[in-house]
Every structure is written in structure tokens, then in C-alpha cells.
Image (cartoon, rainbow, N blue to C red):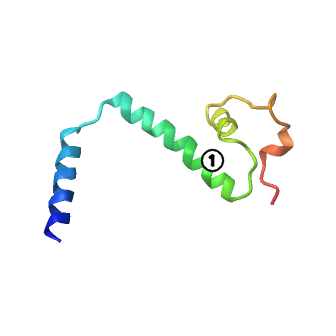
Amino acid sequence: MDDLLASIRAKKAALDEQRPMAEAALRQLQKYYDVELTYTSNAIEGNTLTLRETQLVIEGRSPAGERPMREWRSPL
């Protein structure tokens, strides 16, 4: 158990050395998670958009040329 706690403390210290993160890195992480979590959540609900199509929608661009608009919604 002591080995596990020591390992956790060492990893936490290494993480703390990286803080604070650069603003650009935080924005990039936020963008990634916005797309990834939205795609995953929509897929669970039955949406058939691909990850790339989801990214286009979130960015305000239309994947309409790639897929008919009727397929943008969940079939439920």
C-alpha cells in the first residue's frame, strides 16, 4: 500500500510541475473534449453523424455536402 501511495504522490508532483498550463493548450483540450464528448453522447442516442461531421457542426460549418440533412438527427 505504501508503494502505491508513493507512486501516486510522485505522479501528482510531476503533474503539478506542468501547471499552470499554457492558454493555447487549454483551448486545444477544450476543443477536443467538446467534439469528442458531443460525438459520444450523440452516438449513444442513436445519431449517425461521424466524428468529423460532428466536428463540422460544432464549428458552425455544414457537413450537408457529405450527408443529407435528414440524417443529422437521431432516428428516435
Residue 19 point in image, percent of width and height: 23, 39
The image shows a total of numbered marks equal to 1
Looking at the image, is 27 positioned above or below residue 72? above
Residue 50 occupies quadrant: top right
Viewer-side residue, 32 vs 69: 32
Residue 57 occupies quadrant: top right
Kindly identify the residue that appears in the image at 67 percent across and 58 percent down.
Answer: 44
Q: Is residue 17 left or right of residue 65?
A: left
Kindly identify the residue that appears in the image at 82 percent across and 56 percent down.
Answer: 75
Image quarter hosting the C terminus: bottom right
- Name the residue carrying label 1: 39
Residue 3 point in image, percent of width and height: 16, 64
Give the residue type at disc 1. Answer: Tyr
Residue 24 point in image, percent of width and height: 37, 28
Residue 68 occupies quadrant: top right
In the rendered image, the residue lying farthest to the bottom is 1
Disc 1 is placed on an element classified as helix
Q: Is residue 22 left or right of residue 40?
A: left
Image quarter hosting the N terminus: bottom left
Looking at the image, is 23 positioned above or below residue 2? above
Residue 55 point in image, percent of width and height: 63, 36
Kindly identify the residue that appears in the image at 50 percent across and 43 percent down.
Answer: 33
Kindly identify the residue that appears in the image at 70 percent across and 59 percent down.
Answer: 45
Viewer-side residue, 46 vs 4: 4
In the rendered image, the residue lying farthest to the front is 3
